[in-house]
């Protein structure tokens, strides 16, 4: 059984030609997959296909179609600036028609799970970049999705905040075990986070290399200094260099 | 100290200007019907204070009624359009045509429709036409200004059209709506005065009526007094909406 899959996908944009494909990806339930590649390799397109926000030109997308079964965290926190952190996190439930009291209770629990229980009344402008990103993560997890899609969630964060968030994602993954696809430029982040790393070529996006990171999830911070980590980072970087040259 | 000086300088400048005006008028013996001295304007203002205040209120209340009318119509049409994308292409040319047509040109028509016994209705209608466009334009732009990623999020959770409108597009439009109303408030006052010039205001005599009356009698000082009140009214309306905008935006953004 797969959690979601892209089968022989091709995406053409009028006037810009082929953006992605042919490309295939099958996700096992509870697996964390990182898509690594240079800008314009179609990794964000692949994510939008999995989210059902875009349709492929050719090929099949297979995904859990139920409301709230797929969640996305974008590059920016993408919170509603006029709403409190709690109301932002409760949004997916409100759109599903969950009653207000229950939605608020579940949203509060999701906020607590990312360490933001005290910030429930704060507006996004009052949150730091890292806090806003964690609120976005809480919003994604509030429906207990089977598939979680992360589009460069660390891009705008500093190193320390980034590591904290990566550890948070692992911890939360351990509770709900959603399948995660996560797009990044950062090789070390990909290796630390993922059980499988896919390196993609630019224009059009295709698979250059696929690597399994053979260490149990969630991983301790110490994994970043292990021999396996260093070896995987080197192999991924080498594959990325080849992809850029191709 | 610097701040106090910053507030004092414009006051001093105006005082200097008034003093120069007073001295020049007296020294050159300028006739009062041509250019009255500031002291004569102040005198006219004091003599006619009650009359001018009542007229100012008449003009202001017509402008406010026009603003409310424009706001309700513009919002209703903008909302209808936002639920039906095809409608915008049909309505926008009409709205633009209305905006670029000089108000004085359509005044006689509106006078006929309002009925010659009800010139105040014509004034309100005409001022509303002038105030309509900035609110309509702000609403249309604002309703489309939502963060595209938030729009995608609403797609992802299969939000219904009404949910998207109430939870995303309307709140996103708030800053644009405030800006539109601020501009429209000033325009409504201007529109009311211009409309009054061309339509008259019947039993209720607004500031424009006082201006015409004073002009016909060569009471130039009284004209200046009426203009002064008109200017103050515009400034006050603008300041009020500016303060309202800041207060609401502060709440909206949370800082």
Image (spheres, coloured by chain):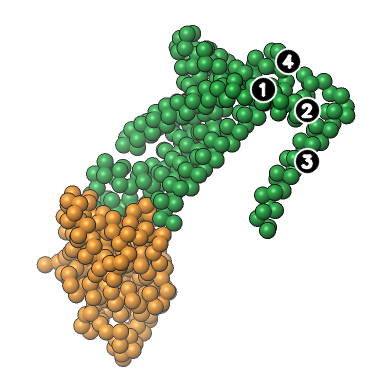
Q: CA distance from mark 3 to mark 4?
A: 27 Å
Q: Sequence order check: which comes first, mark 2 or mark 1?
A: 2
Which of disc 4 and disc 1 is earlier in sequence?
1
A205 or B125: nearer the eye? B125
Instruction: Name the secondary structure under disc 3.
Output: helix
Do the dots labelled 2 and 4 sit on one chain?
Answer: yes
- Chain on which label 2 sits: B
Q: In the rendered image, which residue does mark 3 sit on?
A: B16
**What's the residue at 70%, 53% (across, down)?**
B5
Could you tell me which chain the residue with mark 1 belongs to?
Answer: B
> Residue A63: where, in percent of width, then height?
18, 59
Q: Nearer the viewer, mark 2 or mark 1?
A: 1
Report which residue position mark 4 lands on.
Answer: B218
Q: Upstream in the sequence, badge 3 or badge 4?
A: 3
Q: Dot 2: within a 10 Å radius of its alpha carbon, few (fewer than 14), some, or many (20 or more) residues?
A: many
Query: Which chain does tag 3 point to?
Result: B
Of the residues under marks 2 and 3, which one precedes in the sequence? 3
Q: Is residue A149 visible?
A: no
Q: Residues within 10 Å of mark 3 (few under 14, many from 20)?
A: few
Q: Position of residue A138 (x, y in %)?
A: 27, 64
Image colour for chain A is: orange
Residues at marks 2 and 1, CA–CA distance in whole angstroms: 15 Å
Residue bearing mark 2: B37
Q: Quadrant of the C terminus of chain A?
A: bottom left
């Amino acid at each position: 059984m797969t959690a979601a899959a892209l089968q022989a996908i091709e995406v053409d944009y009028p006037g810009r030609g082929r953006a992605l494909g042919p490309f295939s990806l099958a996700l096992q339930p509870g697996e964390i997959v990182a898509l690594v590649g240079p800008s314009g390799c179609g990794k964000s397109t692949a994510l939008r296909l999995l989210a059902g926000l875009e349709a492929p030109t050719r090929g099949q997308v297979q995904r859990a179609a139920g409301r709230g079964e797929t969640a996305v965290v974008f590059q920016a926190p993408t919170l509603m600036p006029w709403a409190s952190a709690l109301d932002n996190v409760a949004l997916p439930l409100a759109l599903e028609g969950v009653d207000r009291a229950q939605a608020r209770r579940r949203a509060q629990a999701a906020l607590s799970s990312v360490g933001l229980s005290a910030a429930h009344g704060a507006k996004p402008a009052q949150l730091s970049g890292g806090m806003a990103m964690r609120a976005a993560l809480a919003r994604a997890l509030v429906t207990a999705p089977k598939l979680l899609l992360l589009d460069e969630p660390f891009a705008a964060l500093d190193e320390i905040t980034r590591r904290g968030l990566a550890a948070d994602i692992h911890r939360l993954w351990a509770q709900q075990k959603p399948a995660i696809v996560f797009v990044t430029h950062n090789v070390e982040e990909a290796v630390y986070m993922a059980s499988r790393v896919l390196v993609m070529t630019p224009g059009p996006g295709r698979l250059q290399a696929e690597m399994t990171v053979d260490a149990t999830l969630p991983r301790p911070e110490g994994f970043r200094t292990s021999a396996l980590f260093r070896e995987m980072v080197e192999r991924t970087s080498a594959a990325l260099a080849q992809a850029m040259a191709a | 100290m610097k701040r106090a000086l910053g507030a004092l300088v414009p006051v001093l400048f105006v005082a200097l200007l008034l003093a120069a005006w007073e001295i020049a008028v007296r020294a050159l013996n300028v006739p009062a019907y041509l250019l009255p001295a500031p002291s004569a304007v102040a005198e006219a203002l004091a003599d006619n204070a009650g009359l001018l205040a009542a007229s100012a209120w008449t003009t202001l209340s017509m402008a406010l009624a026009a603003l409310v009318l424009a706001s309700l119509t513009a919002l209703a049409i903008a909302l209808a359009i936002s639920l039906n994308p095809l409608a915008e292409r049909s309505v926008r040319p009409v709205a633009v045509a209305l905006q670029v047509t000089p108000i004085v040109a359509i005044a006689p028509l509106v006078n006929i429709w309002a009925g010659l016994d009800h010139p105040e209705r014509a004034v309100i209608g005409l001022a509303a036409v002038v105030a309509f466009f900035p609110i309509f334009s702000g609403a249309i732009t604002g309703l489309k200004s939502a963060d595209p990623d938030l729009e995608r999020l609403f797609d992802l959770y299969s939000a219904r059209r009404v949910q998207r409108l109430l939870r995303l597009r309307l709140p996103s439009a708030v800053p644009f709506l405030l800006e539109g109303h601020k501009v429209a408030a000033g325009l409504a006052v201007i529109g009311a005065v211009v409309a009054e010039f061309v339509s008259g205001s019947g039993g209720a005599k607004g500031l424009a009526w006082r201006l015409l009356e004073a002009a016909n009698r060569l009471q130039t000082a009284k004209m200046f007094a009426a203009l002064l009140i008109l200017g103050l009214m515009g400034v006050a309306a603008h300041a009020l909406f500016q303060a309202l905008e800041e207060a609401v935006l502060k709440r909206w953004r949370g800082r």
